[in-house]
Amino acid sequence: MAETTTLKTPRRAVGRPRNETTRLQILAATLRLLESQSVQSVTIEGIAREAGVGKATIYRWWESKAMVVIDAFLEQHVVKVPMPADLPPALAIAQHLRSLIHEYSGWSGRIVAQIIAEGQSDPSVLREFRDRFHAGRRTLVRESLLAWAKASNIPVPDNVEALSELLYSPIYMRLLVGHGPLNDDFAREHISYVYRLLGVPTPDWDSLGPVPTPARKRARRSRPASAADAAP
């Protein structure tokens, strides 16, 4: 089951081709600011100052601050919660969910919650988040669930999205409401419960490997001087 998530290229005004070193520099600057500031308080002016570029450079390639933040989040987050291609579907989905729960317990969860919060007053933010992140992940999960159904004969509703929401909604509920922790106890309880509902064996927890460590704050650095230094 290959990782097939496709992240859309952000819409931007026609202009000079985007320089990769500068792109990484801007995204790294955005990530540094988000270590100590909220999505709401970060500004294009602040990003430009931190990255050592002009505001016009940022606006040439991104339509708004929210789009820069979403791009920075995607660079940091997606590689940390893959759908493993080398495991049977049942284990791959369990490992993916466990990784997501632990990643959302840290920096990534805070940023996602703030992006969703900003989207309540600015629908364009939610649209971009759905289009550039959520839609691709849902497609990947749908493919994985169909592969699992074929391999294990699990009961899949006519609309497989309903099963996807059964798996993911409790995670986002805890992320946004904060009524319970996103930790390994929750991961075990939630995944085991859903698997029992589906009538399949609960995953062997030891086979999922060590508990993932959520993204930690990176030490603040001076402005990056190269693409390698700028990589988030």
Image: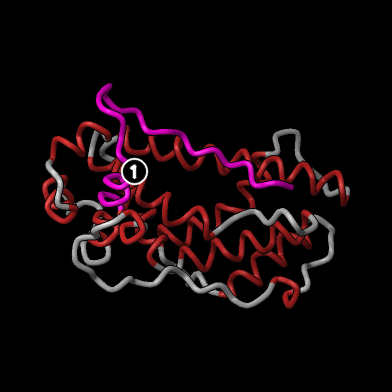
Q: Position of residue 87 (x, y in %)?
A: 77, 59
State which quadrant residue 101 falls in.
bottom right
State which quadrant residue 16 falls in.
top left
Relative vertical location of residue 169 with respect to residue 187 in this rendering, above or below:
above
- Specify the amino acid type for callout 1: Glu
Residue placed most toward the observer, 64 or 186: 64
- Residue drawn at x 30%, y 47% as measured from the top left: 21
Q: Does the segment drawn in magenta span residue 16?
A: yes
Start and end of the magenta stretch?
1-27
Along the horizontal axis of the image, is 175 left or right of 66?
right
Residue lying furthest front in this view? 226
- Residue drawn at x 29%, y 56% as measured from the top left: 226
State which quadrant residue 223 falls in.
bottom left
Q: Does the segment drawn in magenta span residue 173?
A: no
Q: Position of residue 135 (x, y in %)?
A: 53, 37
**Residue marked by disc 1:** 20
- Residue drawn at x 41%, y 60% as measured from the top left: 108
